[in-house]
Amino acid sequence: MPRLQLFFIYSLDAKSVGVKLGILGLGTVGTGTVQLLQDTAGRHPLLKEIEIYRVGVRSLSKPRQVELSTGVVTTDLEAIVNDPEIDIIVEVMGGLEPARTLILTAIKNGKHVVTANKAAISRFGAEIFTAANQAGVYVMLEAAVGGGIPVIQPLKQSLSVNRIHGITGIVNGTTNYILTRMQTEGSDFNDVLADAQRLGYAEADPTADIDGLDAADKIAILASLGFDGRINLQDVYCEGIRQVSKTDISYAAKLGFVIKLLAIAKHQTSDHSQLSVRVHPTLVPQTHPLASINGVYNAILVEGEPIGQVMFFGPGAGAGATASAVCSDILNLVATLKTNTPKSNPLLACRHENYLQITPISELVTRFYARFLTKDQPSVIGKLGTCFGKYGVSLESVVQTGFQAQLAEIVVVTHDVREGDFRQALAEIETLEAIDSIPSILRVI
Amino acid sequence: MPRLQLFFIYSLDAKSVGVKLGILGLGTVGTGTVQLLQDTAGRHPLLKEIEIYRVGVRSLSKPRQVELSTGVVTTDLEAIVNDPEIDIIVEVMGGLEPARTLILTAIKNGKHVVTANKAAISRFGAEIFTAANQAGVYVMLEAAVGGGIPVIQPLKQSLSVNRIHGITGIVNGTTNYILTRMQTEGSDFNDVLADAQRLGYAEADPTADIDGLDAADKIAILASLGFDGRINLQDVYCEGIRQVSKTDISYAAKLGFVIKLLAIAKHQTSDHSQLSVRVHPTLVPQTHPLASINGVYNAILVEGEPIGQVMFFGPGAGAGATASAVCSDILNLVATLKTNTPKSNPLLACRHENYLQITPISELVTRFYARFLTKDQPSVIGKLGTCFGKYGVSLESVVQTGFQAQLAEIVVVTHDVREGDFRQALAEIETLEAIDSIPSILRVI
Ligand SMILES: NC(=O)c1ccc[n+]([C@@H]2O[C@H](COP(=O)([O-])OP(=O)(O)OC[C@H]3O[C@@H](n4cnc5c(N)ncnc54)[C@H](OP(=O)(O)O)[C@@H]3O)[C@@H](O)[C@H]2O)c1
Ligand SMILES: NC(=O)c1ccc[n+]([C@@H]2O[C@H](COP(=O)([O-])OP(=O)(O)OC[C@H]3O[C@@H](n4cnc5c(N)ncnc54)[C@H](OP(=O)(O)O)[C@@H]3O)[C@@H](O)[C@H]2O)c1
């Protein structure tokens, strides 16, 4: 390949040409970002070349934790994305609209975009990346998954020399905080949730976190990068933690597991023809690297060939950590702008245009944990076994545990089984006279 | 800033201009690298554009695990680094010379360099990076630390928006394997070492690993990136694991610690005026993120502002994992070559030229664990306390434990103390009549 001599000239003096940012949003993440950029001593020197040119908010009268010159803060977000002076738009306002439209307008205007908005990217990623490729700009999203943890960039760059087999993450801090407290305190879900809300670890409307929707957005993004294709968010199977009980947490512990809300994207077969993408509470062996990730921390485990297992761990949210990720994207763009080339860097651009085929959950092959309340203990295990056997479900362990209101409790862990077969067996088991109810069904990793 | 429109054109067909590699070495890492590059399906498509043009070895007659066309393998490594056809030199031969000279020649010839050679980089980094900056080429070293774990690139890019406070790593798989087995089996160092050598986890001459020299090379490299300056390897304090006994491992466990060989680079004071860089066996609280890193795995914990703590975990060595890191560097260079710009990317280049001032170990402020064998138990604790008090050492815990050959054993853990003061206290304690010996002195994190 013919080579060009590179010139290593940094112009880091105050008078050098600055890169102008338009920041949409000055809430938790926006404020953290502005604070970081206003206090650059001891950080990468390139940050000094950035000018916070405009910041868009909803209310001009709200008190702010950062000082910005007059004229910088505005409620006219349209004007920001249309301002020809601005090089990079930093979208940290959240929500679907007007975020989507503003991002698309910025792209159309030839601006690079940094966003922390997993909800918008997981839904409108295809539209946004197509527009970006057409306009010849980059859309960066390190902050959208795993807060401060550098995981998007490694997946796009370093790890992409591997054949990725699986990505498994604890990517929602709120649910991990709740599950950790349920586990260490033996408390009930509702009590811990209420307390988490009081302490600010869970939102007043906790649906997006608790029901796994936030984690689904994130695993859709990770899967897209790891498996090189677009993901239809509707294809991501999603189950939250509302039904996880302290009873199951304590049985799981006795069996050597902890219960975590995992977001999983994994090839089922070695020919890579079946990709499953899903979020659900999961029994994780206590020795598994993800088992010891507690509290609001996040961790993402990537498995590939030839690398084996690598895991990234860190704070999954918070002003500072998320600002670190936002600013790392800004830094990357500033560095790219410095190279002043009309050719795109294929490691920064989004390169896939096909949609990935996702295997339906009924085709998943996994182990299960199930807890039964039964009336008629002596013969019921035999009956369970017969039903399971009929559908090809083989049992790894069966534990008869305590009694609850005169009902015996039986906990089983299966070997690998096709989910559809397991569900059929359960449907038949539910009709058995001896079965009172099946309070819990959880997958095992 | 004036903007250029980027063009997103990939030419991924077989006829596209290839990037030519000259690989120095076809041992463990070289073979893994060739295998990865010869089997690109399912990996980043840019890898298809790479041609393995020359591979340098010592012996042409040695059987190889990979097939290469006639003329590719050669013993003339000089010719490779001087070949004008070659774009990138991949140095995976190891050792100091001729590796250093070959790297410098390649740089002088305008070739980019990828190296896995922590020994050469930690010693000759200043010379190599100066030459690279002058020649306008990049020197990439992801594989030099943490095997497959992407840690160099995150430190140079994402994490560099933070003020780094500390980097703490388990960066030597051999010693972590030995300590893990000593811990789980209660075995002696020498027995586990012999077994590790038999199983191929430790080399016939284990000095570089066991005495912490390999870890010192690696923390010098990490510290240089994290704290933005060059490190004089002689300034890195280094203590290996030969003196770690199963007795101390079991006392540590009772006190809630595990013993790990840590490589640490940390600002001692909040004004960042004192940087300590060191390798030593360390008592790590069982709840610390590094405590559960076992076997040959590596992990690197980075602490900074505003990110907090992030940790990278993965295989620290091995053909596949290391090849993943080597190929990620190659990919990065190929992507950069594609952008065809004469301007350097400031996130890939090495940007520091100053040497960092390292605080001598005597100025370290840390907690200590010490084990004493004493003759005269009833009064000896008082005497220890008096001596410690005289030098400002305050004790967090004192445990009188068992007897060994009629000697009583006393284990103390101190509060934070200046190492110099602690050593003076120990020197005085050693002269006490009641003290038989001080078999172990370990730092506590
Ligand atoms: N918080 C985290 O830890 C975290 C972590 C990772 C990713 N994220 C993502 O980062 C994004 C921002 O989160 P956040 O927690 O910083 O949100 P936030 O605290 O609610 O802040 C949102 C900001 O955007 C402004 N805004 C919202 N809608 C607007 C509109 N229609 N017009 C003008 N301004 C508008 C608000 O203006 P006012 O101030 O005037 O109300 C506010 O400044 C979200 O996509 C979130 O998912 C957050
Ligand atoms: N092994 C790992 O897991 C690992 C992990 C991280 C980093 N690294 C680093 O990677 C580098 C390579 O390690 P390795 O384990 O692959 O070493 P290795 O198995 O000993 O292979 C060294 C290769 O270099 C060739 N070579 C050495 N000296 C030479 C000379 N003077 N002239 C010509 N050829 C020469 C050898 O040729 P012959 O084959 O003809 O003898 C051999 O192919 C080292 O810097 C090491 O620290 C290794």
Image (cartoon, coloured by chain):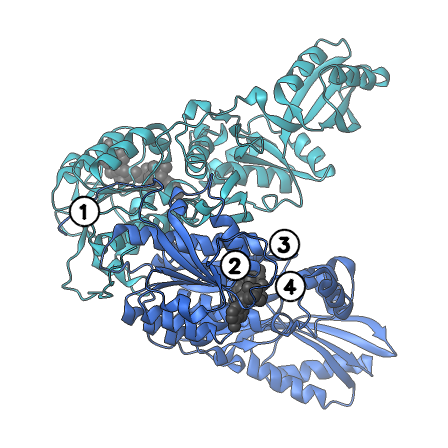
Chain colours: A blue, B cyan
Q: Amino acid at mark 3?
A: Ser
Rounded to the nearest angstrom, the CA distance separating label 4 from label 3 is: 16 Å
Q: Position of residue B231 (x, y in %)?
A: 41, 28
Q: Is residue B292 left or right of residue B63?
A: right
Rounded to the nearest angstrom, the CA distance separating label 2 from label 4 is: 21 Å
Q: Amino acid at mark 4?
A: Thr
Mark 1 and mark 3 residues within 8 Å of each other at the beta carbon: no
Which residue matches tag 2? A30
Q: Amino acid at mark 2?
A: Gly
User: Which chain is home to disc 3?
Assistant: A
Rounded to the nearest angstrom, the CA distance separating label 1 from label 4 is: 49 Å
Name the image quarter holding the N terminus of chain B.
bottom left
Comparing marks 4 and 3, which lies closer to the viewer? 4
Rendered image: mark on residue B87:
1
Which residue matches tag 3? A292
> Does mark 3 fall on the same chain as mark 1?
no
Report the residue at 70% width, 65% height from top: A252
User: Which chain is home to disc 4?
Assistant: A
Comparing marks 3 and 2, which lies closer to the viewer? 2
Rendered image: mark on residue A174:
4
User: Which chain is home to disc 1?
Assistant: B
Report the residue at 22% width, 42% height from top: A7
Q: Earlier in the sequence, mark 2 or mark 4?
A: 2
